[in-house]
Image (cartoon, rainbow, N blue to C red):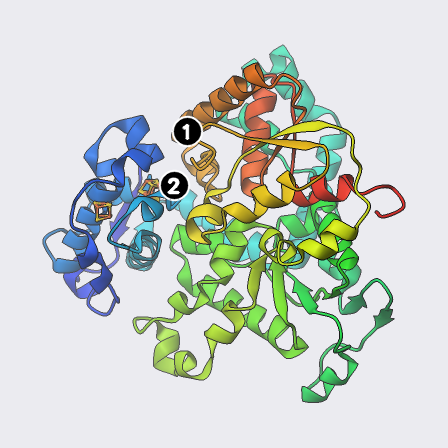
Amino acid sequence: MNINFSQKTAVSAKELFRLAEFDNILKCVHCGLCLESCPTYRELDDEKDSPRGRLYLMRGLWEGALELRQSVVEPLSRCVNCRACESACPSGVPYGELLEKTRGIIFENTTQSFKERVLRRLLLKGLFRSTSLMITASYLLKIYATTGLPKLITKTFVGKLFPRSFVFQQHLLPNFSGKSFKLKYADEVISSEVSEKIKPYTGPSGKSKRLKSKPRVGMFSGCIMDVSEAAIHESTLTLLHHIGCEVVVPGNQVCCGAIHVHSGDRETARELALKNLVAFEPRHLDAIITNAAGCGAQLKEYNLLFSKETSEAKKGVRSTVNWQDFEKKIIDVLEFLSRYPKLLEKLSWREDEDTVLYDAPCHLIHAQKVDENPRQLLNNLPGVTLVPLKESDWCCGSGGIYNLVHPELSGAVLKRKTESIRQALTTNPNATNIITGNPGCLYQIRAGIRSENIDLHILHPVVYLAGRLKKNES
Ligand code: SF4
Ligand code: SF4
């Protein structure tokens, strides 16, 4: 996609980057060890579209050697933000943080095209910020799916009347429920022995309801996930319930803001971060569970949104909020479950044989550095054989809304993933499921296998785990 933008002021890039905390970019020694892990470099074979090339551009902006021009901004926009380069980098360059700050400065200081402004206003400032709009959209899209139109477009000649990207987007549609998970369970304590309504938090005295003997955890429900793929949240709840947790689902939680941060809209992301802090912190939780790798990575990095260049810092927010306490409670459900191997072992699992393929989401493996736990959990299931895909740790091209903004490049990255899947199926023809722990990856890979007519189901690990419980356990 060509970027159409104009800079709002005549201020130099050096001046715009003056307050950004950017010193870590100096850690890059230009060794190039990250290049071979970059999906866009592999597809485009251009240094500008590699991590090293992008860091060079960012450093040029920061030091004043470059200005915000199309040729500088475009390669930065083409980064899928998978952060595989961070895992490959021996110098510890925090690539994701630097990219997101740069995108923030670009977003705040340039005027996008009319179409892009409308889209951003509708999606970033509207839909992803409002639970009621999200429920309405989910409801309408659920009706749309029941009309059979998506199938008509993807399975018949009708699809030929539309652009390929539109046809692919039909495959991408999540299974919308038309209902909000968080509102269904809002402020209800759910445990294996206790299910009592508690009053919404009104002050420090609210902690009197806490049962000390069990871990009390909050569940983060996200934005699109809150109104779609209901099985993922319900299965998470089932598993947490089975290991004896009390689970609280705050009804006033909101989108994590990852999509906003990736797009450069850090102001809205900060607004969402503060709302989530208010939603979770007063509930006296031992942990905050996420089942979306992208959300988890964002929630764990809220402090980065409040660095000294932000207006919030000027207003003193940075000094009044202790993000560390919040961030250290954030944990992916798979990492959390793997802390309780003995409890899991005691559950009654099915023992029938099954072979499953596994793909590691980038924001779990590269951003959160959670790699072993999901594989161990699945491997420990009686009767289950886990087959990691070749290049399982490579991006699928989803990248939040990257697949909508850069459909062609995203499609090329996805193609590589579906080729790995085909290859794995050749040697494991009995595999019926592929498992991945991030909804964005799940939608993207599902769209890939559907559009290529690969006969495979795709599931979130918690859905698979809950499905392996014997009926009297689930
Ligand atoms: S985040 Fe991913 S796409 Fe972007 S430079 Fe790093 S490896 Fe390449
Ligand atoms: S980001 Fe790291 S791996 Fe890549 S060129 Fe710089 S120092 Fe080397």
Q: Residues within 10 Å of mark 1 (few under 14, many from 20)?
A: many
313 left or right, relative to 328:
left
Q: Tag 2's secondary structure?
A: loop
Residue at 35 percent across and 33 percent down: it is 39
Note whether 9 is above or below 203 in the view shown: above
Residue holding disc 2: 80
- The kind of residue on which mark 1 rests is Val
- The kind of residue on which mark 2 rests is Val
Could you tell me residue 365's position as x and y percent? Answer: 46, 46
Whether ligand 1 has any atom under 8 Å from the Cβ at mark 2 is answered as yes
Quarter holding residue 445: top right
Could you tell me residue 467's position as x and y percent? Answer: 77, 39
Mark 1 vs 2: CB contact within 8 A: yes
Q: Residue furthest bottom?
A: 205
Residue at 62 percent across and 67 percent down: it is 287
Residue 413, numbered label: 1
Note whether 325 is above or below 237 in the view shown: below
Going from N to C along the chain, the mark reached first, 1 or 2, is 2
Residue at 34 percent across and 71 percent down: it is 307
Note whether 316 is above or below 351 in the view shown: below
Note whether 20 is above or below 200 in the view shown: above
Q: Is residue 346 at all visible to an observer of this figure?
A: yes
Could you tell me residue 406's position as x and y percent? Answer: 40, 34
**Real-space CA distance between mark 1 and mark 2, rounded to the nearest whole angstrom:** 10 Å
